Amino acid sequence: MSAIFSITKHRIDALNDGVFAIAMTILVLEVKVPDIADRTSVSALLHAIMHHMDVIIAYFLSFTMLGLFWVWHHRLSSKVREINFAILIWSFVFLSLVCFFPFAAAVFGRYVLAGNVGGLLVYLPTVFLILLSQTMYFRTAMKNGLLHAEVSEKEQRSAHRHNMLWTGLFTLSCVPAALAAGLTAAITVAVVAIGFLWRSFAWR
Amino acid sequence: MSAIFSITKHRIDALNDGVFAIAMTILVLEVKVPDIADRTSVSALLHAIMHHMDVIIAYFLSFTMLGLFWVWHHRLSSKVREINFAILIWSFVFLSLVCFFPFAAAVFGRYVLAGNVGGLLVYLPTVFLILLSQTMYFRTAMKNGLLHAEVSEKEQRSAHRHNMLWTGLFTLSCVPAALAAGLTAAITVAVVAIGFLWRSFAWR
Amino acid sequence: MSAIFSITKHRIDALNDGVFAIAMTILVLEVKVPDIADRTSVSALLHAIMHHMDVIIAYFLSFTMLGLFWVWHHRLSSKVREINFAILIWSFVFLSLVCFFPFAAAVFGRYVLAGNVGGLLVYLPTVFLILLSQTMYFRTAMKNGLLHAEVSEKEQRSAHRHNMLWTGLFTLSCVPAALAAGLTAAITVAVVAIGFLWRSFAWR
Amino acid sequence: MSAIFSITKHRIDALNDGVFAIAMTILVLEVKVPDIADRTSVSALLHAIMHHMDVIIAYFLSFTMLGLFWVWHHRLSSKVREINFAILIWSFVFLSLVCFFPFAAAVFGRYVLAGNVGGLLVYLPTVFLILLSQTMYFRTAMKNGLLHAEVSEKEQRSAHRHNMLWTGLFTLSCVPAALAAGLTAAITVAVVAIGFLWRSFAWR
């Protein structure tokens, strides 16, 4: 059983890398080749691409986000020795959100950059859930004693506190955007942010 | 020969993980970014996305299905030591159906959720064939003595019985949907379901 | 140098598996979800999907082709110990054609099944070039002494003869289709086929 | 820490191969299946595909570019022993540009081949940035002493000089195209090219 699940760790890493590679590449499908009336006009093409610049910037921004998630997840998962059922669930929740990210990025590129703050109400919750699922992934590994022996208890705590700190800071930065969905939403977001930050500092 | 095929096991696992990673990510391409008339209207965008909610739910549902298939297949394939020609065939049948799954999921998301039960006549048979090909994959490995030595005969039987049990239960749950294709279809499905369940309990 | 290139072998296998996994999955994108006027009509949906059946069959056929290429290439590449520049070139020619295959398969599904034999003039040459690049890949490895030591000379020759035999037989089977492009094309194809078959039998 | 980052090397290679495999396969999505009025007309289909020939050539050209990048990057990264934060950044810059390449290739295929030199102003800068990020990747590894011990200092310098030489030669070849964007652009490009070439020859 344990042997089987430790193989799972190796295989789920491969699945993970595959999903990230594809999600990153799919982002570029949103950068559409412009269609211009006069196919041979240099200035029309350059104008169309300049007009496109916001979508291109959104692509690099979203790529950076996925890159950060990958590095963060990699650093957490490299501390994990073995996988049990609960960690498997969190891994798949994480993966399903990473796969969902290109949709959120597309909404971001098409609406938020056009000044429609409503698009953030898809983008930011997706990012929040990715951060949350990573935090829960590591917390579960820690609580179930499935980390590598060489990861000291102090290191574990520090990593978990960092996870909560960043999730909290990100959530706090979402309060202004949440106002677009009403005051109740903004207050809820603020409370969640404070919860994470408080847990991060109080947690031992 | 044997050495070559045992490498195949390793390589076919990689192919398998790649296919799953892509199938999972392709699911999200069905979640189209809504096109709204007034690009800057927050409420119009939120309304459009709310309208979209069923497609988003269908995405997470189909992702969960693929996740379950992956975990199940991984647990079966981790018991397999070596691959022969028959297992190779079943592996590819399985893979071709996994690759086909995003199409079935798209039909599901666009029609079943809109109340058209006809879409189930694509989705459910695809899932059934995936379950069947996994069951046959493991059965072939078992019959040809290609499992790892440390997998006891009792474990083998238990795994195979489980495969048949779940395939049977799933088939049974399809009887109501099969009624949409007529009484004969429903009876056929019921007979197949009972066949699997009977084999699962009677099999030693 | 040699150490670096033997790593390349491992990495190019990974690239290879990735490309196959994606090409296989991309095939399904040609199977479009049908658009029907009355979204809730069960019979209209089933009718539309039945109409679609040829595209679905084409999908499984093309998947089988890719599966055969993968298995064949895997059996050849598992005999290769090291990679030099010439083999690298043939590997990439092979990969570029595998990536191109989904386009050929789409032409096949949309035109050949609709009775337009012209589509074969894209599909069959692509398959031929895939077979040719595999044959050349192995021939180059053999001529440069880059196969594993445990592969006996007899095995090498047998594998190469098989490659040429199958390429020849496939080419021969293309003669009728080549007639659609004129008599000269058909004769050229026949000559190439006979060349491969002759080499296969005469080769020592 | 060091142990964790040396795993990263292995994992980032996997991510890298995945991204290349997908970018290569995505290129073919630009080769659209032609739509012809009379579906059964052989000559109309062949005519449409001949008309398409430039897009097909562009596909193989762009594939070759990605193949060259892959081989080059592989040869550089196989000399790297360990990864630090700066190298990680350059790896992701490189990956984001590789993922972006299919867009540049699509612009190339649709406009440059139709005689619109403006498309080069997307394609060439993308290629330049890919070359630059590879050069910086290796330079960073060299400056931080993160190369394998068996790579002699002479080999390191030679590799770095080659990187700069090729980047310089490529940049020089872009001067005519840069003229399309005005004289200032052409002069800037020429200066950058000379800078690289000078560094390549003067560097020790």
Image (cartoon, coloured by chain):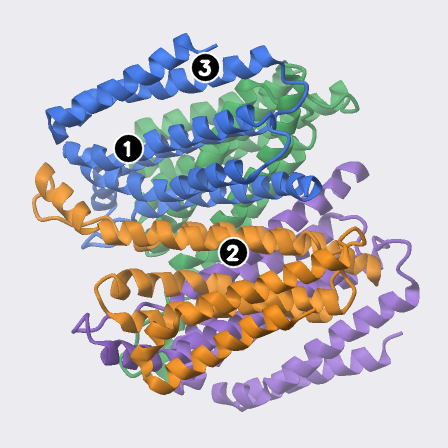
Chain colours: A purple, B green, C blue, D orange
* Circle nearer the N terminus (3, 1): 1
Q: Nearer the viewer, mark 3 or mark 1?
A: 3
Q: Which residue is most to the front?
A: D202
Q: Give percent across and percent down for residue D70.
A: 54, 53
Residue for point 22% across, 32% down: C120
Q: Which residue is mark 3?
A: C161
Front in this rendered view, residue A22 or B195: A22
Residue for point 59% across, 56% down: D73
Q: Give percent across and percent down for residue B135.
A: 56, 27
Chain ID at mark 1: C
Looking at numbered disc 1 in the image, what kind of residue is underneath it?
Answer: Pro
Q: Which of the labelled discs sits on residue D69, or is there none?
A: 2
Q: What is the spatial separation of the Cα atoms under label 2 and label 1, in whole angstroms? A: 28 Å
Up the image or down, B126 lies above or below D34; here it is: above
Q: Nearer the viewer, mark 2 or mark 1?
A: 2
- Label 1 neighbour load within 10 Å: few <14, some 14-19, many 20+: some
Q: Secondary structure at mark 1?
A: helix
Co-location on one chain, circles 2 and 1: no
Residue for point 44% across, 26% down: C135
Quadrant of the rendering where the C terminus of chain B is positioned: top right
Quadrant of the rendering where the N terminus of chain B is positioned: top right
Residue B100 visible somewhere in the drawing: no
- Label 2 neighbour load within 10 Å: few <14, some 14-19, many 20+: some
Co-location on one chain, circles 3 and 2: no
Q: Which of the labelled discs sits on residue C125, or is there none?
A: 1
Chain ID at mark 3: C
